[in-house]
Amino acid sequence: MTDIKTPPIEPTLLIEMYRRMLTIRFFEEAIFDVYRKGWMPGLAHLSDGQEATPVGVCMALRPDDTITSTHRGHGHIIAKGGQVEPMMAEVMGKVTGYCRGKGGEMHIADVSLGILGANGIVGGGLGIAAGSAFTAKREGKGRVSVAFFGDGAVNQGIWYETANIAVLWKLPLIYVCENNQYTEFTHWKKLTSGEGLAARARAMGMPGVEVDGNDVVAVYQAARELVEAARRGEGPATLVCHTIRYGGHHVGDPGTAYRTKEEMEEWRKKDSIQRCEQLLVESGIFSPQDIEATRSEIEGRVQNAVQQARQDPFPPVEEVTEDVYA
Ligand SMILES: Cc1ncc(C[n+]2csc(CCOP(=O)(O)OP(=O)(O)O)c2C)c(N)n1
Ligand SMILES: [Mg+2]
């Protein structure tokens, strides 16, 4: 008889984390396919490989907490409760999309879910997140604001400007740096002086914590502690999650010119979804058949979203100047 491990967190929570991570993985794989078939305009920045970070963080949030996202935002949106059908439609520029087809893959937002938007400007979400944290503090209902950003945004001035005021004013703002090792084609160590962002955060006067960003339970536990402290009025914190993107910087980049095969093989051994599946089975929460059934259910939903979005219409030409600001 095999030993059944005690799960580190509530089984229902672990199952939900698994489902959201799988949704992100299948969604990103589907987008790559959609791109190659020429069914979407422009490029896409995919986050397969990074799933545990947005899911671990967002499972520590309340529905009325807010997040800001990046150019690599699909995972953040799904993790915060975004639905794949209007996301897929938005990627294809269809009227049924989250932004009626006018935002595209890089500008998906749903304020009703606390998703204040993906953002093509590196570091652009940081100011919005600080503003949301300021509002949350004034409201006094214990809401928290999370800013997701990459290792490339760490050296943008806006991080220091917002961090300074967030510490001084004790804003409920959690900085979540997804360190996927590369800023476009350059390793983060070639761009960032000193010990990295967690050390810089501590120097600014807030907690700076680093975690294995491919371990969804570890991310959740670290995020929950920081989020709850922010809710209690203890101010901002920084969480650095070390992870990897499996694909290139965008769908047009194979991602092989600046990363070695060995490096990627090492990361694949730390795959977040495989580790979660192992935990579910070893804890007796899921059988291998449950894993298969969940995979095919979620993949089927994503594929249906692709088929539906293909059939949906583009926005009518008369609407071209509506809902746009420039
Ligand atoms: C202000 C600004 N500078 C430069 C760019 C071009 N650019 C787009 S993505 C990117 C790299 C971002 O790297 P990182 O923050 O690590 O995020 P990742 O792509 O790894 O998710 C750059 C330089 C931009 N979009 N905005
Ligand atoms: Mg990066």
Image: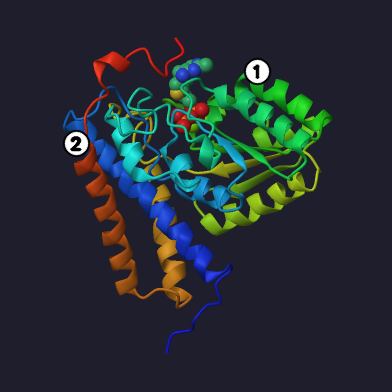
- Name the spot of residue 312 as percent of width and height, x first: 21, 34
- Name the spot of residue 150 as percent of width and height, x first: 53, 32
Identify whether 220 is placed above or below 13.
above
Residue 157: mark: 1
Residue depicted at x 63% and y 57%: 221
Residue depicted at x 28% and y 60%: 297
Number of residues whose C-alpha sits closer than 10 Å to that of mark 2, classed few (under 14), some (14–19) or many (20 or more):
some
Q: Which residue is mark 2?
A: 310
Say left or right for 85 vs 127.
left
Decide if residue 57 is in sight here.
Answer: yes
Q: Residue furthest front?
A: 318
Say left or right for 49 vs 312.
right
From the viewer's side, name the closer residue of 319 and 157: 319
Q: What quarter of the picture does the N terminus occupy?
A: bottom left
Q: Secondary structure at mark 2?
A: helix
- Name the spot of residue 177 as percent of width and height, x first: 58, 36
Decide if residue 212 is in sight here.
Answer: no
Q: Quarter-wise, where is residue 2 in the image?
A: bottom left
Q: Quarter-wise, where is residue 273 in the image?
A: bottom left
Kindly identify the amino acid type of the residue bearing the numbered disc 2.
Arg
Q: Secondary structure at mark 1?
A: helix
From the viewer's side, name the closer residue of 125 and 221: 125
Kindly identify the amino acid type of the residue bearing the numbered disc 1.
Gly
Q: Quarter-wise, where is residue 136 in the image?
A: top right
Residue depicted at x 25% and y 20%: 316
